[in-house]
């Protein structure tokens, strides 16, 4: 039986040869992402901005009367409603942001949502509400705050664990790689103004988890090789480690993509944003493990005796002092 | 390493089978589209985003509780001073700035007043509810203590939760979940609800019914401008009443609260043929109502619901029977809703809907079908890829993967957790982690073989060396999952739950189980060649 081999044996790709230009590009990308997030801003969905998102079906029609709907709802004076097709041709999603004046009034979001449903149903008695998400300003503010905490604490706690299990340089490397992944994902969402919701926070955490898997696999191999090849220069050793784990990296990324792409193509509409973000994160996460997490070890000065038990270092020095090899 | 004693094999197989079997009722009920229930046993709950239904978050304002306590205190203080012997004269009563202050007409009464007030400020519980201060020798200022107010808010929320439960039960919905959340919130979850609007209307209604005398001295022009005489207040007519848009002046104190009701029904007024709500008082409330109506025959009194006047009929004769009729431009439906609301008791505080998530049953079902379909395709592709890449070891990995999914479902059923839409994404990620573990192991075995190790040694080293990275990766992900659960909310939590359970089961199936299978095969067949 011939088995499939995706990566040939004994690859020797010089990944780290390009580490400086890649690092520069990545740092520029991180800076650009934050610039985008700060200037253009994220397109907050109902979860984070407050307001309502109502999905419904015009049961008696082939096609949803979107322009007419837009006219009707603009007259309500809650700013410009976002009305899009959602699923079938006769299904729409209506999104209305909470007006700034309603930020402090807890009951406002619900009142506006009721008014919208009443208005649409009055003009189109065949309108059926399929889903309704209404979030008041207070709750959306809490969601924003909680999500920021969840992201920051998760990243810090992970780094501390890696610092304990490996060395401090590895902890910083992992933190930097995760920061890279989160920044680029946020930047992407800001650039394309994709809707940023609570589900996307879940996606970002999934990306962090995946990227971390990659980083740990590479780090574990680096640690092993540091013990094995004490004399090998660090850049060479890192290249070796990445090459040795390359088959695994490709295979794992591929299986995950194979599982995610059907979900992207045939899965429920409501999962699209989440799955799209995770799919994107697989690429970003793999890249960051190789080009962000590994090279930083060179600059942070990992020593080849980092993982040799302390006694043996002492013993070795003693031996050297005695003139033995 | 490859040595599995019998007891260990029995234990591993037993626990796998047990947890996988626990998944069966859930799978059968999902496949049976929820209309048949072939196997009894714990099942995975479907989140409202999958099953359809409404999630409503209600919130009360503590400031409202404070305001109400202040009003009750004012009336208690007036009563206490009046009933004291001899009577203690007070004046210049004010409830501004969240505190009650009043002046004694005679400053020598100060010690007697303090004594009368003592039971009021100490309250019934263990905490002191009010602070008393004397200013300028004859002005008494009462402020609420923080703990007293906290206690009052807690009590109000407890009884509000009860009232919400009674109202939802009256709607006849099945299996609602009603939980207090934090200090001032109540979560209501109702699966498969046809009309969420009716539910919201019912919950949004405080149903605080009051009867107050109309102020006969108020000038119509003042009333329309919102100017009240001392001791009176201006209230608007309800939108449904005949005088919608107008105001009316009523006496602030001395009315009757409708919290002593024993019943309320929607009926029809035989004279006007319009829907009305008839109510019954308990004996105490009935006596008070009789007294009020006897003393005020031929004067109008206002029927007030949630600070809006429904109607202000004349008292034609004393009402002694302990019952009354509320009219005010009702339809049959609004009268019926009001009857339900009154029957289940008034909410001690207004509750505002601050978050609503409703999913129609069709959309939920659609999501499950699409999600399951997409996951089936994805799983088949993953299995195919694993088998063509790793041969026999790919088959083991596939077996581990299937058991992994079953075990997650089984544990979720056992813990009675809820599967949400993001939870499905958590499944995908878990499967990814499980696949990754097998890939790591198998690649390592390949590597060790290439280095010339013998078969058993290669497998042994492969498992040992790969496990280190697998454990590190899973523990860090576990940390992330726990933080996600603690700080996340709503859908993020649903994701975290599956992720955390999945981390344990994926390590168990992908590392421990496959090792047992591989060891069994190696011992039995003693292969001379390893296709991997």
Image (cartoon, grey):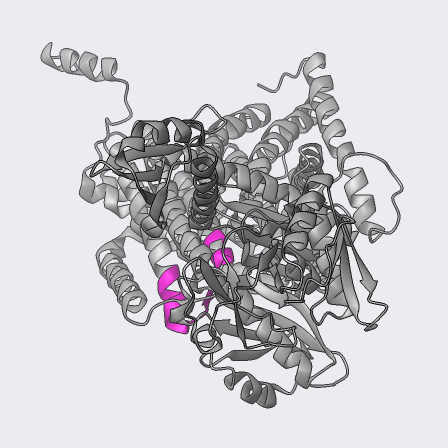
Residue B516 in sight: yes
In the visual, does B47 lie left or right of A203? right
Q: In terms of depth relative to the viewer, which is nearer, A291 or A37?
A: A37
Residue B191 in sight: no
Residue at screen point 30% across, 50% down: A292
**Outermost front residue:** B86
Residue B345 magenta:
no
Q: In this view, does B384 lie above or below B508?
A: below
Q: Position of residue B497 (x, y in %)?
A: 57, 40
Q: What is the quadrant of residue B160 in the picture?
A: top right
**Outermost top residue:** A322
Q: In terms of depth relative to the viewer, which is nearer, A117 or A313?
A: A117
Image mark count: 0
Q: In this view, does B435 lie above or below A134?
A: above
Q: Where is residue A144 in the image (x, y as percent from the top left)?
A: 40, 55
Q: Position of residue B244 (x, y in %)?
A: 59, 76
Type of secondary structure dominating the magenta stretch: helix
Q: In terms of depth relative to the viewer, which is nearer, B215 or B95?
A: B215
In the visual, does B411 lie left or right of B492? right
Q: What residue span does the magenta drawing correspond to?
A: A185-202
Q: Identify the image quadrant of the C terminus of chain A.
A: top left
Q: What is the quadrant of residue B460 in the picture?
A: top right
In the visual, does B380 lie left or right of B307? right
Residue at screen point 69% across, 54% down: B341
Q: Position of residue A221 (x, y in %)?
A: 38, 36
Q: Identify the image quadrant of the N terminus of chain A.
A: top right
Residue A187 magenta:
yes
Q: In this view, does A257 lie above or below B514?
A: below
């Amino acid at each position: 039986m011939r088995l499939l081999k995706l990566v040939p044996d004994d690859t020797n790709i010089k990944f780290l040869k390009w580490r400086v230009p890649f690092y520069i590009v990545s740092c520029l990308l991180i800076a650009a992402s934050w610039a985008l997030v700060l200037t253009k801003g994220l397109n907050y969905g109902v979860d984070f901005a407050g307001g309502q998102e109502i999905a419904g079906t015009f049961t008696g029609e082939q096609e949803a009367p979107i322009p007419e709907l837009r006219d009707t709802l603009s007259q309500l004076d809650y700013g410009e409603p976002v009305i899009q097709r959602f699923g079938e041709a006769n299904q729409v999603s209506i999104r209305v942001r909470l007006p700034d004046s309603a930020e402090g009034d807890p009951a406002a979001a619900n009142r506006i949502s009721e008014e919208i449903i009443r208005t649409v149903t009055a003009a189109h008695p065949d309108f059926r509400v399929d889903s309704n998400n209404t979030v008041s300003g207070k709750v959306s503010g809490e969601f924003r705050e909680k999500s920021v905490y969840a992201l920051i604490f998760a990243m810090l706690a992970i780094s501390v664990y890696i610092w304990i299990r490996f060395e401090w340089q590895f902890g910083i490397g992992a933190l930097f790689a995760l920061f890279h992944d989160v920044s680029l994902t946020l930047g992407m969402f800001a650039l394309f103004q994709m809707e940023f919701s609570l589900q996307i926070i879940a996606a970002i955490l999934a990306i962090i988890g995946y990227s971390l898997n990659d980083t740990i696999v590479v780090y574990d191999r680096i640690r092993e090789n540091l013990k094995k090849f004490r004399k090998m220069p660090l850049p060479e050793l890192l290249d070796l480690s990445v090459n040795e784990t390359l088959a695994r990296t490709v295979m794992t990324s591929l299986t995950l993509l194979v599982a995610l792409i059907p979900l992207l193509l045939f899965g429920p509409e409501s999962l699209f944003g989440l799955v799209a973000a995770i799919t994107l994160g697989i690429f970003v996460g793999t890249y960051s493990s190789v080009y962000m997490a590994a090279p930083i070890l060179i600059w942070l000065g990992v020593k080849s005796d980092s993982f040799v038990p302390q006694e043996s270092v002492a013993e070795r020095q003693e031996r050297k002092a005695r003139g033995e090899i | 390493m490859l040595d599995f004693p019998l007891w260990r094999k029995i234990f591993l197989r037993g626990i796998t089978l047990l947890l996988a079997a626990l998944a069966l009722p859930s799978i059968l009920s999902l496949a049976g589209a929820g209309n048949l229930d072939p196997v009894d046993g714990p099942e995975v709950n479907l989140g409202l985003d999958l099953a359809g239904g409404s999630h409503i978050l209600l919130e009360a304002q503590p400031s409202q509780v404070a305001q109400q306590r202040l009003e009750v205190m004012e009336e208690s203080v007036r009563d206490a001073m009046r009933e004291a012997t001899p009577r203690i004269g007070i004046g210049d009563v004010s409830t501004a700035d969240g505190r009650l202050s009043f002046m004694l007409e005679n400053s020598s009464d100060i010690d007697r007043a303090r004594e009368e007030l003592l039971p009021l400020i100490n309250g019934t519980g263990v905490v002191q509810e009010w602070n008393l201060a004397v200013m300028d020798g004859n002005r008494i200022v009462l402020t609420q203590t923080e703990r007293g107010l906290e206690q009052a808010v807690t009590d109000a929320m407890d009884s509000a939760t009860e009232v919400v439960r009674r109202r939802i039960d009256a709607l006849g919905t099945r299996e609602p979940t009603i939980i207090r959340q934090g200090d001032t919130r109540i979560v209501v979850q109702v699966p498969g609800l046809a009309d969420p609007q009716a539910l919201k209307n019912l919950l949004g209604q405080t149903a605080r019914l009051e009867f107050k005398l109309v102020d006969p001295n108020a000038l119509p022009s003042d009333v329309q401008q919102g100017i009240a005489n001392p001791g009176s207040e201006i209230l608007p007519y309800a939108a449904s009443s005949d005088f919608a848009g107008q105001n009316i002046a009523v006496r602030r104190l001395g009315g009757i609260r409708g919290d002593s009701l024993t019943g309320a029904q929607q009926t029809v007024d035989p004279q006007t043929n319009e829907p009305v709500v008839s109510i019954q008082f308990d004996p105490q409330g009935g006596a008070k109502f009789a007294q009020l109506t006897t003393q005020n025959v031929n004067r109008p009194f206002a029927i007030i619901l949630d600070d809006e006047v429904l109607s202000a009929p004349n008292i034609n004769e004393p009402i002694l029977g302990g019952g009354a009729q509320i009219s005010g431009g009702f339809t049959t439906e609004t009268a019926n809703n009001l009857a339900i609301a009154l029957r289940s008791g008034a909410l001690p505080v207004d509750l505002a809907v601050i978050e609503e998530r409703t999913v129609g049953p069709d959309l939920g079902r659609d999501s499950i079908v699409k999600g399951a379909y997409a996951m089936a395709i994805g799983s088949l592709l993953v299995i195919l890829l694993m088998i063509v890449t790793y041969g026999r070891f790919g088959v083991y990995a596939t077996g581990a993967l299937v058991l992994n999914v079953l075990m997650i479902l089984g544990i979720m059923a056992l813990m009675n957790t809820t599967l949400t839409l993001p939870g499905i994404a958590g499944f995908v990620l878990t499967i990814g982690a499980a696949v990754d573990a097998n890939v790591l192991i198998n690649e390592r075995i390949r590597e060790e073989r290439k280095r010339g190790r013998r078969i058993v040694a290669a497998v042994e080293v492969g498992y040992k060396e790969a496990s280190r990275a697998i454990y590190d990766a899973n523990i860090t992900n576990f940390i992330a999952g726990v933080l996600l659960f603690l700080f996340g909310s709503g859908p993020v939590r649903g994701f975290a739950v599956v992720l955390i359970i999945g981390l344990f089961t994926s390590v168990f199936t992908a590392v421990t189980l496959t090792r047992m299978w591989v060891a069994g095969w190696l011992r039995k067949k003693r292969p001379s060649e390893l296709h991997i």
